[in-house]
Amino acid sequence: MNKTLFRRINVVGTSGSGKSTFSRQLADVLKYPYIEMDALFWKPDWEQSTDKEFFAKLEKYLQQTTWILDGNYSRTTNIKWKEVDTVIWLNYSWQRTVYQSITRAIKRSLFKQTLWAGNKESFKKSFFSRDSIILWMLQNYHRQQQQYLMNMNDPQWRHIQFIRISNSKHAKQFLQQLQNLSND
């Protein structure tokens, strides 16, 4: 593995797959700026940015020479993958992702964890709303898997190195390999 091959990295995967945790760890290992797409998208009171606002923010951050971009937002693919060299797909099992989504929602609700733009998840929003992130994950898990498989084989994205990580052991090994290269 050659560290210099990794300059602009997008970490993708369904909600609850651990993208943010992995992305932060990767940014720490590589000493690259960490960009969280949710932080660019969400406004106070769970108001969504318009595409124009969101795309402008994203394009501004992606002007840096190195970065770790955390997030999917399929409508931004042409923007974020124009200059990306590596896409790391956290493709964990459905069972693990469901478990992680539910436990994360419970923790965020119970501890009133502040998220992007001061927003907080509530138990009601997480479990009893049409806007539930858990419901969204359940409805989109398989569709997202199919989309990333198609993207990996799409000639439009042949300039991208795709890395598929299917479990936390593999993720830890990958980060450790990069850490070892950074120490050399």
Image (spheres, grey):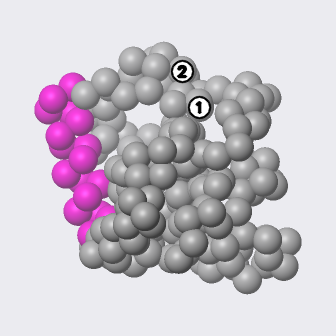
Residue 181 in view here:
yes
Q: Nearer the viewer, residue 153 or 173?
A: 173
Left or right: residue 95 versus residue 15 is left
**Which residue matches tag 1?**
41
Expressed as whole percent of the image width and height from the top left, the position of residue 52 reads 79, 29
Which residues make up the magenta segment?
A: 96-112
The amino acid type found where label 2 is placed reads Lys
Per the rendering, the mark at residue 43 is 2
Where does residue 28 sit, x and y in percent of width and height? 40, 46
Outermost residue on the front side: it is 184
Residue drawn at 55 percent across, 48 percent down: 68
- Mark 2 is surrounded, within 10 Å at the Cα level, by few (under 14), some (14 to 19) or many (20 or more) other residues, namely some
Residue 5's quadrant in the figure? bottom right
Q: Where is residue 1 in the image (x, y as percent from the top left)?
A: 53, 77
Task: Judge by depth and name the residue closer to the eye, 11 or 127.
Answer: 11
Main structural element of the magenta stretch: helix, strand or loop?
helix
- Residue shown at 43%/64% (left/top)? 184
User: Is 11 a magenta residue?
Assistant: no
Residue drawn 48% across the image and 24% down it: 46
Query: Where is residue 64, by image quadrant?
Result: top right
